[in-house]
Image (tube, helix red, strand yellow):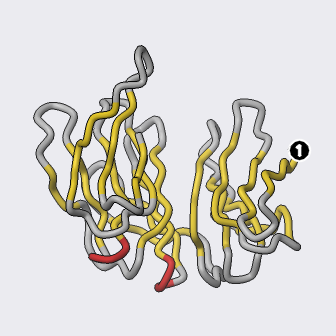
């Protein structure tokens, strides 16, 4: 799945043959997508300060949660919870399966992207202070894993717990070994 920022669309690329299907068009500059275990696609829609869900069952589009101000990053966990980097509110928000929104951690400047590991720890690319932060699943504490990035826009965690950072201004992918 791709948030096609320049073409204002969400696209699916088939693994088998590379065929591209437009799932949603007319969305202004979408930033990121995430897919849950049921195949529902979630879209960070900063221009409308919204999170959208494209239902796997019928392709219908609905808004999920409210009270966002430029959500950029989005991910889901194995339980179906959604995690959002709400850039302009300087928050990481969790939307549970009942639709309840809670804030996780504090001290973010401009969180741009999020990912979650198998243990439920949330990782944040904070491009406001050029750091990667971790919100511990055990107690919600926030720690800095890495600093000195120039514009960290992407963060991903592998199965071994290593953290990968897309650092835009330096045009590099960096690895934080855990």
Residue at 47% x, 85% y is 89
| Rendering quarter of residue 167 | bottom right
The answer to whether 129 appears left or right of 22 in the picture is right
Above/below status of 175 relative to 105: above
Quadrant of the rendered image containing residue 147: bottom right
Identify which residue, 94 or 155, lies in the foreground: 155
Residue 118 lies, in percent from the top left, at 62, 36
Image point 41% across, 39% down: which residue?
1
Counting from the top left corner in percent of width and height, residue 161 is at 76, 39
40 relative position to 44: left or right: left
Residue 129, image x and y in percent? 74, 82
Q: Quadrant of the C terminus?
A: top right
Q: How crowded is the residue under tag 1: few (<14 C-alpha within 10 Å), some, or many (20+)?
A: few
User: Which residue is more in the foreground, 41 or 170?
Assistant: 170
User: Residue at coordinates 48% horizontally, 50% vertically from top-left?
Assistant: 75
Q: Residue at x 51, y 78 (%)?
A: 87
Residue where numbered disc 1 is placed: 177
Q: Is 88 on the left or on the right of 116, as rendered? A: left
**Which picture quadrant has residue 2?**
top left
Residue 110 spot, x, y in % from top left: 60, 80
Residue 15 or 129: which is nearer the viewer?
15
Q: Please, what secondary structure does the residue beneath circle 1 have? A: loop
């Amino acid at each position: 799945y791709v948030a096609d920022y320049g073409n204002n669309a969400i696209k699916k690329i088939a693994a088998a043959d590379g065929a591209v299907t437009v799932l949603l068009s007319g969305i202004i500059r979408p930033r990121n997508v995430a897919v849950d275990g049921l195949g529902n696609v979630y879209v960070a829609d900063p221009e409308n300060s919204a999170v959208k869900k494209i239902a796997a069952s019928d392709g219908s589009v609905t808004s999920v949660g409210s009270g966002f101000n430029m959500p950029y990053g989005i991910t889901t966990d194995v339980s179906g919870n959604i995690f959002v980097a709400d850039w302009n509110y300087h928050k990481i928000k969790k939307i549970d399966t009942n639709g309840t929104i809670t804030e996780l951690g504090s001290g973010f400047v401009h969180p741009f992207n999020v990912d979650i590991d198998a243990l439920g720890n949330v990782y944040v690319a904070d491009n406001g202070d050029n750091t990667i932060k971790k919100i511990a699943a055990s107690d919600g504490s926030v720690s800095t894993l890495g600093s000195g990035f120039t514009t960290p826009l992407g963060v991903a965690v592998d199965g071994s717990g290593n953290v990968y950072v897309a650092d835009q201004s330096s045009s590099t992918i960096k690895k934080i070994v855990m």
